Image: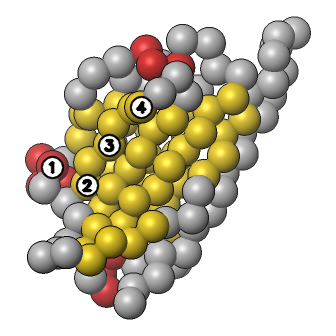
Amino acid sequence: MLLLPLLALAAAWSHGQAQVLLKQSQASISRRQTTTARIECIGEGIPNFQSVNIHWYRQIPSKAPERILYIGSGQAYYDHDSYRTKYSSLKKGPNVCTFSVNNINSNDEATYYCAYW
């Protein structure tokens, strides 16, 4: 089973308002006909979470981080068209954004993290 190391990126800053915090869950890997890894990013202190952009990055060891996609109030916007079948994201509830890596294989071994600004 492929294990995806995760970096729980916690972005916290204060502008005289509430503190912002992003927390990531460990990947859950399900195996049906294909194998999919799913990660949740939980936003705290982000007003209007459903309408803000949440960015998802991948960092392969010894390489710079690479943005895969971002999602705002509706659909996800991909940095490369080829990512549309490999990755997906959606928002659920008042403060949760999920990210999925589909048909995982050894090339997908990386650190995946969410970001907000």
Distance from disc 4 to disc 2, alpha carbons, whole Å, reads 17 Å
Distance from disc 3 to disc 2, alpha carbons, whole Å, reads 7 Å
Residue located beneath label 2 in the image: 87
| Quadrant of res 47 | top right
Give the farthest residue toward the front: 32
**Left or right: residue 113 compared with residue 91:** right
**Amino acid tagged 4:** Lys
Distance from disc 4 to disc 3, alpha carbons, whole Å, reads 10 Å
- Residues at badges 1 and 2 in contact (C-beta under 8 Å)? yes
Q: Which circle, 4 or 2, is nearer the viewer?
A: 4
**Left or right: residue 62 compared with residue 9:** left
Please tell me which of labels 4 and 2 falls first in the chain: 2
User: With respect to residue 73, does 104 lie above or below?
Assistant: below
Please tell me which of labels 1 and 3 falls first in the chain: 1
Please tell me which of labels 4 and 1 falls first in the chain: 1
Residue located beneath label 3 in the image: 89
Residue located beneath label 4 in the image: 92
Q: Residue at x 38, y 50 (%)?
A: 99
Q: Is residue 98 visible?
A: yes
**Amino acid tagged 3:** Ser
**Amino acid tagged 2:** Tyr
Distance from disc 1 to disc 2, alpha carbons, whole Å, reads 6 Å
| Quadrant of res 43 | top right
Residue 17: where, in percent of width, then height?
82, 10
- Residues at badges 4 and 2 in contact (C-beta under 8 Å)? no
Residue 68: where, in percent of width, then height?
33, 50
Q: Residue at x 51, y 35 (%)?
A: 96
Q: Residue at x 33, y 56 (%)?
A: 100
Give the farthest residue toward the bottom: 1
